[in-house]
């Protein structure tokens, strides 16, 4: 019933808005183009990467825009007859406006010829600006990292690129965080992938860096976005350019750690466009070292367990997509995207465990040692298929409705075998299979009510159906493996999310703007766990209604200075691995268990941001306060299994956290050929337990944490570019311990050839260290746990890239449209499905 009321409210909003404005339509279907060449008035050289924006005559919002190619050319396609103006912007140059541009049915094309722009007086005194797209851009609602301009990213994967994005950090396991918070939703081209909802860190390792155009970071999403993700949203935009005619890019890299390749093909003619992208990577076998220690204290005795081992890992992955767009006429268009992904990793591990129990005299101490050999096969894959229909009620396209649907399907398989020596321990096999189907339908409506007010509203329904099975086999005194029905399990999980939102955008006098919105979401859950060995398990149901307001106030102080104040409320909805009540006994002495009655985390953030351009440099600074209630934490407790001490980790809404932070990123060019970029985020972690969980909080107090990035790039003669960078992340605190710190150093050189159509380069990571060490610790009443993990990082690789076809960008008017499911807590971001078994 709640979902019915939400959808009725959305429909009423559409009807009311349409009643005010009437129905658009009709008009000429003739389309043409506006083109020209941007020239520096001083040196008479063409300016590449200048920004060209198109407006309706007298309009304040751009209809579309492009950047100039290496020869300074620009071309705006699919332009309907009418009166327009264009603006040309570039750092260090004043904005140039050209008015009175008119196209007609009989003359739909307009060539402006050479357009001269002059550097500002200050820029001429300080430095000669060369054409280069900014690596980092700041927008009213997000930060954009233009990854295709990062030469050291070549040859890597999406995780490597994310390490250098402002406000973002990535740990050794590939878990992504914004401002230290791992409750992040990652989208690909504004849409979710079924694979990322269950195995984010693994999927990111399959996306070649050469496939990424840019990465958008949204720390204070408006009500238009799904409420999930207390930290914010990361959107990975791939290189699906719209270029006249046929064009494409082939790129790749070969190295001592990983290898990848990527191919992109684009076709665009008249009303039809097609973009194909395929890429993949694989790593050479990598051996890591592990040292794991536990100490259990029961009062009269205590037991220590020391585990030393090695693990050999081989990874592989591929991701490909096809996107087709067709414009029926000036008012109706349709697009469809099909994305396929496949990846996995195989492991071979060896460990030696020494267990010692210390007793009070006169009872002697006892020591027991055993070895384990394990093999594992982990695979994940699936597809996302989306369809988007856009109807424009007016010629400028600002009054529109977008109806979208998406089907995502993913499959995760985890198989492993563990053999013990001596055979006093029971050998184990487990086959875990999880299938996730996600169906989404949504509608988004936009209505410009006046020059100062824009209204947006929409609704969405997400239907998730997940089935997870775990088949356990063990020897149990037999010479071969026998199916164990007691420790095997099946889990069916259904989740429905119904949402509606409304957003108002005010463009006020004196350069003020306001973005205000509200969102209402209803979540209903049904779980049906079945495990013969856990007879107390029962089907469960849960539901909750969440109201999500958002507000952003922005003031443009000068043409180069902006200040912004924002408030956002977000939730972190627990997903399958947090809710599954089937006890996971894969490691009988280190068990895990979900909690089907978890409530979502609720966070509220207030942020003050200042952004400015100073000559050819950019600086962005923020201070923020974040309050989170219902922290979802895994609590470790001591248990006894067959007379041996062990641990059980389960999940609870354990407390609240108050965090104060500040972030800064900037780019400066002290001399013509050198650009220095840096970003740093510092914040506090100050958890307060709810009363019933106070005994489990071994790490209380206020902790200061940070993540930082520094890079320098040099543009030399004859097409040579060199860059070096460093990343440093502090240890991350939890209520019971710390996770490892992380740092990395890298450098690269690239040479552009064939008139900038191709390039070759060499990159290196951690040239002075073969291994990186990662230390963590956990403590709880009765036990202490520490671990040391050594992972090989040193690598050297060769990269190449070749672009073919036309290079006149057409980039027709596009809107961010389609399904955008950003609503699940992704936990450790590695395979969210498990199940019983030992």
Image: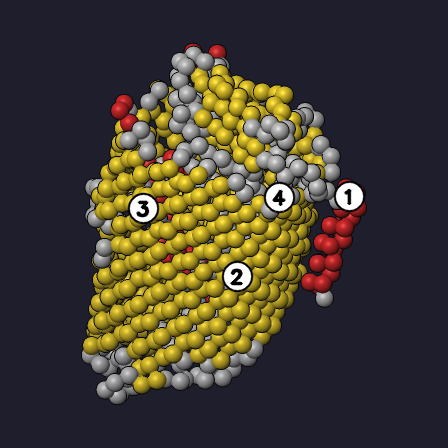
> Are the residues flagged by discs 3 and 2 in contact, CB closer than 8 Å?
no
With respect to residue 428, does 810 lie above or below?
A: above
Distance Cα–Cα, label 3 vs label 1: 52 Å
Q: Is residue 220 visible?
A: no
As drawn, the label of residue 156 is: 3
Q: Earlier in the sequence, mark 4 or mark 2?
A: 4
- Of 235 and 280, nearer the camera is 280
**Residue labelled with disc 1:** 22
- Residue at the outermost front position: 106
Residue behind mark 2: 407
Which percent across, then down, holds residue 578? 49, 65
Query: For the residues carrying marks 3 and 1, which lies nearer the camera in this image?
Result: 1
Labels 3 and 4: the sequence-earlier one: 3
Residue at numbered disc 4: 329
Q: CA distance from mark 4 to mark 2?
A: 27 Å
Q: Nearer the observer, disc 3 or disc 4? A: 4
x and y percent of residue 568 in the render?
61, 45
Mark closer to the chain start, 3 or 1: 1
Q: Quadrant of residue 59?
A: top right
How busy is the neighbourhood of tag 4: few (under 14 within 10 Å), some, or many (20 plus)? some
Q: State which mark lies toward you, 2 or 1.
A: 1
Look at 52% across and 61% down and name the residue there: 407
Q: Secondary structure at mark 2?
A: strand
Quadrant of residue 265 within the rendered picture: top left
Residue 326 relative to residue 148: left or right: right
Q: Are marks 3 and 1 in contact (CB under 8 Å)?
A: no
**CA distance for labels 3 and 2:** 29 Å
Of the two numbered discs 2 and 1 on the same chain, state the one appearing first in sequence.
Answer: 1
């Amino acid at each position: 019933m709640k979902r019915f009321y939400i959808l009725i409210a959305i429909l009423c909003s559409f009807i009311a808005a349409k009643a005010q404005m009437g129905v658009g339509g009709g008009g000429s279907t003739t389309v043409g183009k506006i083109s020209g060449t941007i020239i520096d008035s001083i040196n008479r050289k063409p300016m590449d990467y200048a920004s060209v924006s198109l407006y309706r005559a007298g309009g304040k919002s751009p209809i579309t825009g492009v950047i100039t190619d290496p020869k300074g050319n620009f071309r705006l396609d699919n332009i309907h007859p009418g009166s327009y103006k264009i603006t040309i912007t570039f750092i260090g140059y004043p904005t140039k406006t050209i008015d009175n541009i008119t196209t007609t049915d009989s003359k739909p094309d307009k060539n402006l010829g050479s357009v001269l722009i002059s550097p500002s007086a200050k820029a001429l005194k300080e430095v000669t600006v060369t054409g280069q797209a900014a690596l980092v851009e700041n927008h009213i609602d997000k930060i954009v990292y233009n990854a295709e301009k990062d030469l050291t990213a070549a040859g890597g994967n999406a995780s490597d690129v994310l390490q250098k994005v402002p406000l973002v950090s990535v740990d050794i396991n590939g878990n992504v965080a914004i401002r230290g918070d791992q409750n992040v939703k990652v989208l690909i081209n504004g849409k979710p992938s079924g694979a990322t909802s269950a195995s984010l860190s693994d999927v990111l390792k399959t996306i070649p860096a050469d496939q990424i155009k840019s990465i958008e970071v949204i720390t204070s999403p408006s009500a238009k976005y799904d409420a999930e993700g207390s930290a914010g949203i990361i959107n990975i935009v791939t290189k699906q350019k719209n270029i006249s005619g046929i064009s494409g890019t082939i790129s790749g890299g070969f190295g001592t750690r990983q290898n990848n390749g990527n191919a992109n093909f684009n076709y665009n003619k008249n009303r039809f466009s097609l973009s194909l992208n395929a890429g993949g990577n694989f790593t050479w076998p990598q051996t890591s070292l592990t040292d794991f220690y536990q100490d259990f204290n029961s009062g009269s005795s205590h037991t220590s367990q020391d585990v030393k081992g090695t693990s050999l890992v081989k990874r592989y992955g591929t991701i490909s997509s096809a996107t087709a767009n067709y414009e029926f006429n000036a008012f109706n268009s349709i697009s469809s995207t099909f994305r396929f992904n496949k990846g996995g990793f195989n492991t071979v591990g060896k460990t030696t465990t020494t267990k010692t129990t210390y007793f009070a005299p006169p009872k002697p101490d006892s020591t027991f040692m055993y070895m384990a050999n394990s093999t594992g096969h982990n695979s994940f894959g699936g597809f996302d298929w989306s369809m988007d229909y856009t109807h424009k009620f007016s010629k400028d396209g600002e009054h529109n409705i977008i109806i979208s649907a998406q089907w995502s399907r993913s499959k995760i398989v985890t198989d492993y075998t563990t053999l013990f020596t001596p055979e006093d321990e029971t050998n184990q096999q487990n086959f875990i299979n999880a299938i996730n189907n996600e169906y989404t339908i949504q509608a988004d409506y936009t209505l410009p009510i006046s020059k100062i007010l824009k209204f947006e509203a929409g609704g969405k329904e997400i239907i998730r159906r997940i089935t997870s099975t775990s088949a356990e086999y063990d020897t149990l005194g037999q010479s071969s493996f026998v199916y164990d029905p007691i420790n095997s399990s099946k889990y069916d999980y259904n989740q429905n999310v119904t949402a509606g939102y409304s957003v108002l955008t005010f463009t006020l006098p004196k350069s003020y703007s306001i973005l205000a919105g509200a969102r209402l979401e209803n979540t209903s859950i049904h779980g049906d766990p079945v495990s013969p060995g856990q007879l107390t398990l029962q089907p469960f149901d849960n539901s909750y209604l969440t109201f999500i307001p958002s507000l952003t106030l922005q003031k443009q102080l000068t043409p180069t200075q902006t200040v912004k104040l924002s408030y956002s409320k977000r939730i972190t909805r627990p997903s399958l691995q947090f809710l599954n009540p089937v006890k996971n006994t894969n490691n009988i002495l280190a068990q895990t268990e979900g909690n089907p009655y978890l409530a979502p985390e609720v966070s509220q953030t207030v942020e003050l941001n200042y952004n400015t351009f100073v000559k050819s440099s950019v600086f962005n600074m923020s201070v923020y306060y974040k309050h989170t209630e219902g922290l979802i934490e895994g609590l470790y407790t001591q248990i006894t299994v067959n007379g041996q001490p062990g641990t059980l980790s389960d999940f609870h809404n354990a407390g609240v956290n108050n965090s104060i932070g500040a972030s800064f990123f900037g780019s400066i060019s002290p001399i013509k050929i050198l650009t220095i970029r840096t970003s740093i985020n510092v914040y506090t972690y100050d958890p307060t337990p709810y009363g019933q969980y106070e005994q489990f909080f071994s790490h209380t107090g206020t902790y200061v944490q940070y993540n930082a990035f520094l890079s320098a790039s040099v543009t030399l003669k004859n097409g040579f570019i060199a860059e070096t960078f460093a990343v440093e992340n502090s240890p991350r605190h939890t209520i019971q311990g710390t996770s490892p710190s992380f740092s990395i150093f890298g450098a690269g050189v690239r040479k552009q050839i064939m008139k900038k159509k191709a390039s070759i380069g060499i990159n290196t990571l951690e040239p002075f260290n073969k291994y990186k060490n990662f230390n963590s610790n956990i403590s709880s009443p009765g036990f202490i746990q520490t671990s040391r993990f050594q992972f090989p990082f040193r690598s050297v690789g060769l990269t190449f890239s070749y672009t073919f076809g036309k290079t006149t960008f057409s980039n027709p008017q596009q809107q961010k449209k389609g399904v955008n499911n950003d609503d699940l807590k992704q936990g450790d971001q590695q395979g969210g499905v498990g199940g019983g078994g030992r």
